[in-house]
Amino acid sequence: MTYHPALSEAAKAFLKCEHQLLIDGNKVEPSSGKRTDIIDPGTGNVISTAAEANSADVDKAVAAARRAFEGPWRQIKPAERTRIMFRFAELIEEHADELAELESINSGKPLVFCRNGDVVGIAEMLRYMGGWTTKMGGDTHNISLPGEWHTYTLREPVGVVGQIIPWNFPLNMAMWKIAPALAAGCTIVMKPAVQTPLTALRIGELALEAGVPPGVLNLVTGRGDPVGEAIAAHPGIDKVAFTGSTEVGRRITQAATGNLKRVSLELGGKSPVIIFPDADLEAAAAAVSSSIFFHAGQVCAAGSRLYVHERAFDQVMEAVAKRAREIRVGHGLDQGTEMGPVISQQQLERVTRYIQSGQEEGATLFAGGNRIGDQGYFVQPTVLTDTKPGMAVHDEEIFGPVLCAMKFGDDDIEQLAASANASPYGLASSIWTRDLNVAHKMASRLQAGIVNINTHSSPDATLPYGGYKQSGWGRERGFDAIEMYTEVKAVAVKLS
Ligand code: NAP
Ligand code: MG
């Protein structure tokens, strides 16, 4: 096999491994004996293989997670959990280049973003969440019942958690779920996306090296059906956390009803970007481009619906189209690449089909529109104008580098907010204006879990992240994530 010249020896050695499942701290053959090819989306070539688990492997992982939950992970003092998590963060930093290379070649995202964004971000997430272990206690209460009372709450881990993650941010999506679960004292059965298991497997090894006891973090690689389905339905799992499509989120919710396990969902969106004419239009246009073209638009919070005031429309659109034409699209590991491929042939077909259908439904192709080359899965940064509600490109999550741009006039704020809110999704949004009144009035009217003002992204571990409406249930990051992995127990003592 020939490897990309940017790959280090460490990354190549990892790609060559015969990857197994990680159960109870051991590398385990999948019961099926089957393996999946792992593809570099920048070339379409096979770069590694992974084990394909089935429901029998999920059973084993759940049993291991239960033992670890009732055993070592419960007994380890909170401060020691913090130290283990900090050590885990340090190991990630020590292996930052290798992790970034593996993330880039497997997900297609340019190396520089993987190195400076994802890897740095997951170490921060571990430290942020690791800090909560000693600080997440309960409360005491001022009781008004007759007599004398002492009451308090305990915050306890929810138990064994199943975590199912997508392929767009394999490292980040893994750590957004692993870190709060570890901090809360839960144990984990995780299913990475079938296309992108590599970095999760590598951090699984680092977790053990950091001192996370065997069985606390189990990795069951394989397909949604059967592995994801088995996790969602498993009676031995107390909570399932999912990131991915709305359709699968619904299936998981239904499967979870058997034992009424807790469910949290992060389901993507169709996030509006709203530019008022008084904004810094240059900064706004640059952010529009990065919000939709970053990682080829495969971002749940991508700014995929653009609303620009008619007085600013031409200027903004010209700058966005210029940027769309200039973005350097290429292999994630090539120096200078700004946008990589989409993840798969299937995703390539999905995105190009949307671009086609948009034009058939009356949208105007303003920039891009085509596949690039016939090797790897590259799509041109694409801009559609004259898009309207009712068109699939306007209403549905494309998950590709495709922007739908619309104009607004001097409508009142209510009407503009109604247009922005006319979506089943409600994940992110951004507002561009220098007028504080307009900014905060819009912020209160938008039905979105995240409102950014004069930026489209705010990637900090402290800020809760999640959606209104069909963008999901619950919040990741921040203390909200700890709440999702804990139960609150009220203890009431009647003193005599
Ligand atoms: P998906 O099917 O929702 O995949 C997400 C995860 O769920 C993967 O690990 C997947 O396994 C697993 N899964 C699939 N079917 C399952 C089931 N029945 N029960 C339990 N788990 C199951 O997403 P996709 O098909 O890869 O992408 C389709 C569209 O979803 C995208 O175009 C995009 O619109 C949206 N999406 C959103 C996000 C986000 O961040 N919100 C991320 C990815 C995709 P496999 O590995 O076998 O697929
Ligand atoms: Mg799917």
Image (spheres, rainbow, N blue to C red):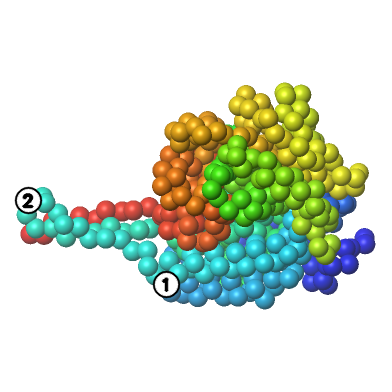
Q: Nearer the viewer, residue 32 or 395?
A: 395
Assign the C terminus to one quadrant of the image.
Answer: bottom left
Residue 187, position in %: x, y? 52, 58
Q: In this view of the protein, which residue sits in the foreground, 481 or 146? A: 481
The kind of residue on which mark 1 rests is Lys
Q: Residue 325 location in percent, x, y?
A: 80, 48
- Would you say the beta carbon of the disc 1 residue lies within 8 angstroms of ligand 1? no
**In the drawing, does residue 309 fall left or right of residue 495?**
right
Q: Quadrant of residue 252?
A: top right
Callout 2: SS:
loop
Task: State the residue in front, 358 or 89.
Answer: 358
Q: Circle 2 is placed at which residue position?
A: 146
The residue drawn where x is 78% and y is 53% is: 327
Tag on residue 77? 1
Residue at the image position 79 percent from the left and 35 percent from the top = 352
Q: Nearer the viewer, mark 1 or mark 2?
A: 2
